[in-house]
Amino acid sequence: MWHLIKSASVYRESGVCWIVTDRQVSPFSWGNYIVMNRKDYEAYPLIRLHEQMHVFYGHSWDSLWMQLLQVFHWFNPVVWLWQKELRDLHEYQADHGVISCGIDVKTYQLLLVEKAVGTRLYSMSCGFDHCSLKKRITMMMERKTPGWKRLYILIAFPLAAGAVFVFAQPKVDAALQTVVVRQAAICDSSSLNMSVSAADYAGLAPDAVAFDVYVNQRNQLMIGVFDKMDVVKLEGLADAVSKRLVADFSSRYAKNKEVPQIVACITADRNAKMGCVYETRQQISRGYELALRELSAEYSAELLQHSLSNRIVYNPPRSYGNPVAKVADKNKRLEGFGITIFMEGEEKRSLRDFTLQELESEIASLLERVDISKNVISIGLNVPKDVQEGMVYDVKQVLRKLYLLKVDVAH
């Protein structure tokens, strides 16, 4: 692998080192390195995304751990079975990560079929063709088991405990550890404040949006344009945003000597956590600051302030998860939500742990008593960080319907 890496072209982006070679190799990843044939790199963005998922989940380190385990437990048949199951699990997890990013399942499955016959892979690496094609496609079509049915596995616990007690030996206890640790973001339950503003972005130029940031249902981030999206971690988002803003601004100015307002667009899955969406916006704002700082040495402050004024727009949330997060019942109490209504800067009314029915009644009653054309009304929305974006969007829709037609609550 190292010999191949040294003889190929190297590109670094978003913490990933891309190794592009003219040799006929199947795509694979190891650590932060992704090795691809040049034709595959240019023609198959979905393969690039699949390999990025391997890097994102740290699958190489799972494989290395398993190799070390085999060194000391080569005589144990269970370890060899574990290796096979772990490799399959890595592919299922990477496939699921690709699908969770909004990629069409059938398109992805057809790509798997197209690339099913490839050259040999490196045994310790994570590769696109490593797992049985039939099993991978079957796993994509599987429905998740409902939570209550998973309780059936509790029946097996007493049997498993008895078997371990009878057959356990101290020498193999150390080997019976969890092979794959689920990576999950931990959000506290503190609140964040988001205000309602009447910012209207309808007047922007058609090409004003420079890039999109997508937050999927597992709170993973992707940045790019259309189908050219790259996986990025939250801590690296500001640098990725800054890099794109600088490149976009420089290319537009070199072409036209005039740069419109450059806007970033956030799109989230309905099941994404609001805390992650909020932190994503914070990182994008930080990216604007870094871009301004880098460009200030070459361009005037007036030009930069006009073009890079930290403008962020929000698309309606998408729904790929099952079940989709929503407020199905208007009488369902939204724990942790808060609404504060201000008139001319003075607090007039507040609601806590309300239902959508109560919110609609309160806003409708306010509009009957107050002429909004003569009074400045603002609404503060307070939501828990661990609530889904879809539920917050449903609340925003009530506010848009009853308060103003053109209002960007998220902004």
Image (tube, rainbow, N blue to C red):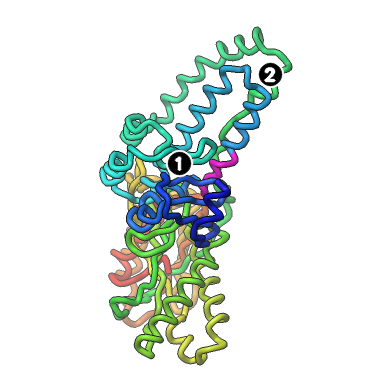
Q: Residue at horizontal 50%, vertical 92%?
A: 300
Q: CA distance from mark 2 to mark 1?
A: 30 Å
Q: Amino acid at mark 2?
A: Val
State the image coordinates of residue 259 (x, y, percent, origin top left). Answer: 38, 85
As rendered, which of 65 and 201 lies closer to the eye? 65
Residue type marked 1: Gly
Q: Nearer the viewer, residue 71 or 55?
A: 71
**Picture coordinates of residue 112 (x, y %)?**
32, 41
Q: Is residue 75 left or right of residue 127?
A: right
Q: Which residue is mark 1?
A: 127
Nearer the observer, 196 or 148: 148
Quick check: 231 above or below 331? below
Q: Is residue 214 above or below residue 162?
A: below
Q: Position of residue 333 (x, y in %)?
A: 42, 47
Quadrant showing the C terminus: bottom left
Q: For numbered disc 1, what is the local secondary structure?
A: strand
